[in-house]
Image (spheres, grey):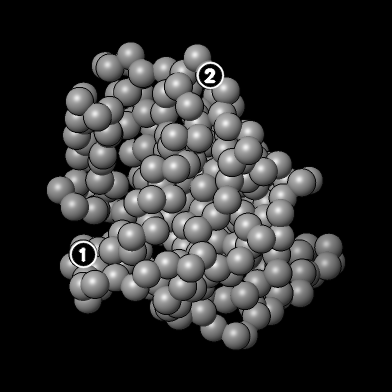
Amino acid sequence: YSISFNCRIGLCRYDYSGYGRSTGKPTECNTYADIEAAYNCLKEKYGVADEDIILYGQSVGSGPTIDLASRLPNLRGVVLHSPILSGLRVLYPVKRTYWFDIYKNIDKIGLVNCPVLVIHGTSDDVVDCSHGKQLWELCKVKYSPLWLTGGGHCNLELYPDYIKHLKKFVSSLGKKSSKPDLKEITMKEGASSKDSEPASSEKPQEAPKCSQISRKSLDSRVGKSKTVDVPEKPRMSSDDVDKFRRRRCLVW
């Protein structure tokens, strides 16, 4: 993996295996190992405390981000940019989590204890905006989300409200010695219905350009959501299993 750190602004950026300048294959297991390595680099080489870390995950990157955040109770905050509920749910509107699914964010987001900001475009044709909205609903500590009207999957940074809202979120978290601003953070029980409304935002002045498309990333392999659910295959009975084992010489 490739990692760079800007000490002046405290920004750590890295590329997953198979992305950008990193070698290897972009598998789920490798991306978990990559974010773990970046986290250990911050801790061991730069001496950064968990309380000073804000994780930022975009699209497929929301998977490793939520996975790490669910295991670190003292993080400062988490930003989810066009996140996914899970890999399979991008393709099919399944109602349950299957064992073969990847990046099961829907099952892990409730374990994140720090404030979470969700940003999603309402016209995202790769990862539907409903993914971001459902993850926000499941957050333990909510921050006012940003639903960018007309925003796609790769152009949210071009909207003026994007950087404004992001800066407001970081400011609300305060300094290390102070507590987050509770006026900006809404708990799950007392969340306002206004937070789920799309944010009024100016349209970007430039045509959207998706730099991720040129990469051999997982995003480029994800198509539009289908409307057909995945049928669950009937399980074999114990008698059928025994017969199958005998035919395959698997009885021991």
In the picture, measured across the screen, residue 117 lies left or right of residue 162, that is: right
Residue at horizontal 60%, vertical 85%? 227
* Residue 85 locus on image (x, y percent): 56, 60
* Residue 167 locus on image (x, y percent): 39, 43
Please name the amino acid that badge 2 sits on: Ser
Residue farthest toward the left in the current orientation of the protein: 21
Whole-number angstrom distance, CA of label 2 to CA of label 1: 38 Å
Residue at horizontal 33%, vertical 64%? 159
Q: Is residue 40 above or below residue 121?
A: above
In the picture, measured across the screen, residue 1 lies left or right of residue 56, that is: left
Q: Estimate how packed mark 2 is, as few (under 14), some (14 to 19) or many (20 or more) residues with alpha carbons within 10 Å.
A: few
Q: Name the image quarter holding the N terminus.
A: top left
Q: Which tag, 2 or 1, sits closer to the chain's start? A: 2
Q: Is residue 83 above or below residue 36?
A: below
Q: Nearer the viewer, residue 53 or 19?
A: 53
Residue 101 occupies quadrant:
bottom right
Please name the amino acid that badge 1 sits on: Ser
Residue at horizontal 48%, vertical 68%? 200
Return the mark for residue 211: 1
Return the mark for residue 93: none
Which residue carries the number 2 mark? 178
* Residue 128 locus on image (x, y percent): 51, 72
Residue at horizontal 76%, vertical 64%? 241
Asked which secondary structure carries label 1, the reply is helix
In the picture, measured across the screen, residue 188 lies left or right of residue 156, that is: right
Q: Nearer the viewer, residue 101 or 250?
A: 101
Q: Is residue 83 visible?
A: no
* Residue 168 locus on image (x, y percent): 44, 43
